[in-house]
Amino acid sequence: METQSGPDHAPSLFAIIFAIIGLVWYVVLWSIGLLGCRTGRKRYRIRPRSPLATAPPDSVPGVSILRPLKGLDANLYENLESAFTQEYPNFEIILSVADEQDQALSVARDLISKYPRVTARIIIGEEVVGVNPKVNNLIRSYREATHDILWVIDSGISVAPGTLARSVDLLESSTHARPPKKRVALVHHVPFVSAPEGFLGSRIEEAFLNTNHAKMYLAINTVSIESCVVGKSNLYRRSDLERVNGSLKPRAHTESDDDQDCPRGLAAFGKFLAEDNMIASALWHELDLRHNLSCDVAHNAIGKMSLSDYVWRRVRWIRVRKHMVLAATIMEPFTENIVASSIAAASLRYLFGVPIWLFLVAHHAAWLWVDLDVYESLAGHPLPADRRWLFITAWCLRELLALPIWFLAMLSNEVIWRGKKYEVLRAGEVKGTSGDGNHRGFFTRWRQQDSHYQPLPNNHSDT
């Protein structure tokens, strides 16, 4: 009796190999998630007071706090006031607006009057150095800042009173380390979101940033093998930024005669939409310096974000990322909960006969538990009972939307930001395109939350 030929068994061998690969990938993802969860517990559940908070002013490095303003963000007064109440003896605040008619000006002036002992001033009028309106708004503050250490905080962010002192501690720590190690060039803060107005898009954004995003962000920065920075609240030295140009090439390779005319400093990043990420990457790759993650959060209160707003916001940043880190963006769906668990369920069913439904129930319960634990670490308290089911519903919607949003993002290179349309180019650079800055189609019309930035003919300061 003749036996079956070898090739008939080949499909089973390939299936076994793929099933094993799927399980290995699943274990890797869980390892990353648990690392993020552990980092959250260790770093954020205890936030010690820095000795710099009570030090004499002349014994600590001065810091210039730069806050670019545009319109009335949710909780704007509280956000800006958090900079005035920092427990640090030597800092100044520079608030900048592009338009002298900006509604944020009245809030800024009220706070300067309320805190006369804080060195603070307003700069009105942008300088156009690129297509990025935030950089155009910041450039004069950047140049006129008194101190070398700059703390750039978005207007939508509030921080705890001890944040600056703890951040300066981290920025200066590597200079006194024994044995010597690579100097810290940038200190950043993980975003933590609240949705006080309760819009659907706001709740989904809250569920995403406070769980899955935070978990991965913490894990990547713990391993620290590559730059990974969100720019809502970053501390760095102007003297370091003046040495980089955004090429991401080691500095020794960018000092040829051909590169002498390339802009350096903040102006060099006006051509990027994600200038914060590029600044962090430039400090890492061009100067071979490192970042550190503070034990503080950048608290962001989200206003009226619809489901459409949420979708197109996520689409925008995926489209930017695919031109900066293509391989990671292509792999992104395989890091998502539903895709990864489906692969693992099929692998376990094929290899060991584990019922798919049983595995998926156990997996999603465990995945949600870890995400809620990350939330608790960042918030400093468990998820309130009266919000638990709304939060879990938003979390489920985020998981279901992740893959469709990714496919939508991969179909085009156009993004809308602050009411203007851009085309994303190589390495995350952008150029303005024609159009009215609206999304149409399956989702509702893009709601323009911000008016255009318009350069002023006469720049002046308000001191």
Image: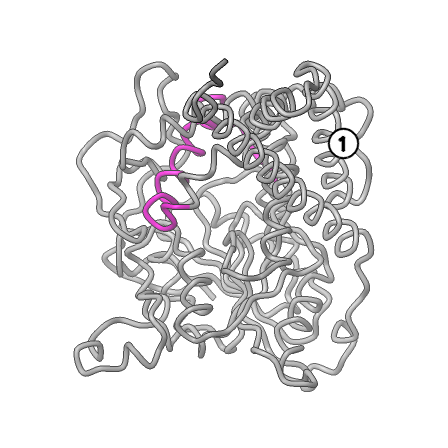
Residue sitting nearer the eye, 168 or 374: 374
Q: Is residue 432 magenta?
A: no
Horizontal side of residue 155 vs 362, given as left or right:
left
Residue 395 % position (x, y): 63, 25
Figure check: 139 above or below 422: below
Outermost residue, front direction?
1
Residue drawn at (47%, 30%), measured in percent from left and top? 14
> Residue 360 falls in which quadrant of the image?
top right
The three-letter code of the residue at mark 1 reads Trp
- Residue position marked by numbered label 1 in the rendering: 369
Q: Which residue appears at 43% of the width and 62% of the height?
A: 281
Where residue 121 appears, x then y in whole percent?
Answer: 50, 65
| Residue displayed at 41% across by 41% down | 329
Q: Is residue 398 visible?
A: no
In the rendered structure, does residue 302 fall within the stretch colored magenta? Answer: yes
Stretch of the chain drawn in magenta = 301-327
Q: Quadrant of residue 21?
A: top right
